[in-house]
Image (tube, grey):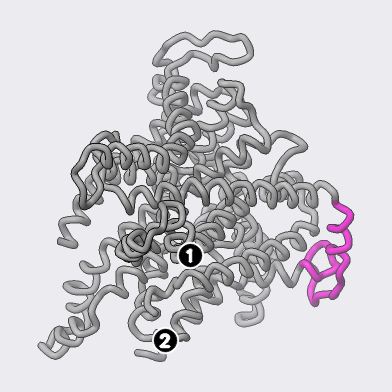
Amino acid sequence: MKVLGRVYLGFVLVFLYAPIAVMAAMSFNSSQFYQLPIDWSLKWYGALAGNSRLIDAGLNSILVAVITTVIAGTLGTAAALAFFRYRFRGKRFLQALLFPPIAIPWLITGTAMLLFFFWTGIGRGMHAMVLGHVALALPYVIIVVSARLQAFDPDLEAAARSLGAGPWQVVRYVTLPFLAPGIIAAALFAFAVSFDQFVISYFLAVPGVSTLPVEIYTSIRKGFTPEINAISTIVIIASMALLIGVARFYRFGGER
Amino acid sequence: MAHEATHDTTGNTAQADRSARAVVLLTGPAYLWLTVTVLLPLVAMLYFSFLSEAPIAGRVGELTLEQYRAFFEHAFYLELILRSLRLGAEVTLFCFLLGFPCAYVLAKTIKGRWREALFLLVIIPFWSNALVRVFSWTMVLRGNGLLERAIETVFPGAGSLDLLFTYNAVVIGLVHSYLPYMILTCYISLQAIDDDLIAAARSLGASWLTILRRLILPLAMPGIVAGAVLIFVPVIGSFMEPRILGGRQGTFIGTIIEDQFTAVFNWPLGAALSFILLACVLVIFIPFTFAARRMSG
């Protein structure tokens, strides 16, 4: 039974990783039509270096993700602190409001943003993508930071106050240092949510100003270029590195 | 909303006022942001769905039920919604069948650092670009692609499957994309089940099937439901996966809604179809969550 379970787990892992591995292998294959055996080369990585559209889109993705992380991290941490510290009417309602951005299909949120931003003159482009990405990342930040706050002992703050610390000093020297791992994990989540976000960006991009996923999608739809394999491989490796970073601060396994 | 804010220990009004101000200052920016980017756009979209045309570029839309009538007049839209719901149900079911045993093995039979490492391995793909992962399937599924070559090696003369650009290709790609959600949510709820409970049931003579049906499944139900919601909702609104993997077979309500916004520019119809889809989600999920809550006690 035990062995069977492990074999099964192995099978699922193969299912999850096989296509990614195939793509990574093909990015090193100089044949455009995926001929086997693989003729190893860095041809497509070279072509990628000369593809300014993809590179610009990549830089846009990073820029949007960094701005999203800073804004969502700050606003989300503030809201999580309020939920932890204060009891007030409407708290449950506010907490429930965090779920629509997760529970409504992105297609609908994205088209609604497109329609509203266009109608009100907010327009599309980088600023619109930041507006949308922060909305998607906020619930994750609030949930992750709140989880960390669960383990926080308010007596620590009381102790600091009784020793003469002012409200800012309490936050600066007691609360924030305790929260730091939670905030870092939340920030990495926010970055990943934004960096991988396709649907919202797709509706809010304008020609010439798009993010990497949008540009990759456009290339796939227009007819395939093997550079996509190369950039996808880079993106996947970067995402994995990021997640391993998150794991350092946030125990996914649940128990210590 | 925060007028009655009170600190845990004190009841005096000056303190209460200060707390109220702190709550507004701390939560205000986040919720203002969500209002502008999610709430108001949804309200605007609901409004657009009752207009004859989008009131942009100088045009004036008149209030009408035309868009909703279009839905009921053309059986085509209803068929597409049903096709999308079927896709959502199938993908969710396969994710459960594949993911639940996987979560069980992880949560109950593997311990320590191995468990943490394997768990991480399972959810890493979930954080790596969904679009890229869907795209990677085109290389595996295409005619004379890797899957066919692999099958050909094991069973020579098995013939061509030609899976790419079929309904099944869309299902495979979506299951691959969303499987980690189900494993994650089931894992969390399975982990909370006390091992002693299972041992006790076994020592009392309960069969393996009884333990699964009467003990494990009911206790894991919140995780299963959470996973099902997290999968079903985005799948019925998916448009990128069907377009890349489904080809001509990839027409679903999601692709039609996308068309209204990016190709046909009939925003009011797109808005109406979106709200009909949302209504279907609610109608399906409200009884479902109640039933799940009752089952899990």
Nearest the eye: A73 or A143: A73
Horizontal side of A140 relative to B193 (left or right) equals: right
Nearest the eye: B95 or A233: A233
Spatial CA span between label 1 and label 2:
28 Å
Q: Can the viewer see residue B168?
A: no
Indicate the chain on which mark 2 is placed. Answer: B
Residue B267's tag is none
Q: Secondary structure at mark 2?
A: helix
Find disc 1 in the rendering and name its residue: A177
Indicate the chain on which mark 1 is placed. Answer: A
Nearest the eye: A4 or A232: A232
- Measured as percent of width and height from the top left, residue A175 is found at 42, 60
Nearest the eye: A25 or B195: B195
Q: Are marks 1 and 2 in contact (CB under 8 Å)?
A: no
**Residue drawn where x is 75% and y is 60% of the image:** A231
**Residue drawn where x is 60% and y is 26% of the image:** A122
Mark 2: which amino acid?
Answer: Gly
Q: Quadrant of residue B170?
A: bottom right
Badge 1 density bin: few <14, some 14–19, many ≥20, Cα 10 Å: few
Q: Is A37 one of the magenta-colored residues?
A: yes
- Measured as percent of width and height from the top left, residue B143 is found at 68, 62
Residue positioned most to the front: A164
Which secondary structure type mostly characterizes the magenta part of the structure? loop
Q: Quadrant of residue A225?
A: bottom right
Q: Is residue B290 above or below residue A23?
A: above
Find disc 2 in the rendering and name its residue: B112
Q: Over which residues does the magenta segment extend?
A: A27-51
Q: Is A69 one of the magenta-colored residues?
A: no
Q: Secondary structure at mark 1?
A: helix
Horizontal side of B167 relative to A154 (left or right) equals: right
Q: Is residue A29 above or below residue B45?
A: below
- Quadrant of image for the C terminus of chain B: bottom left
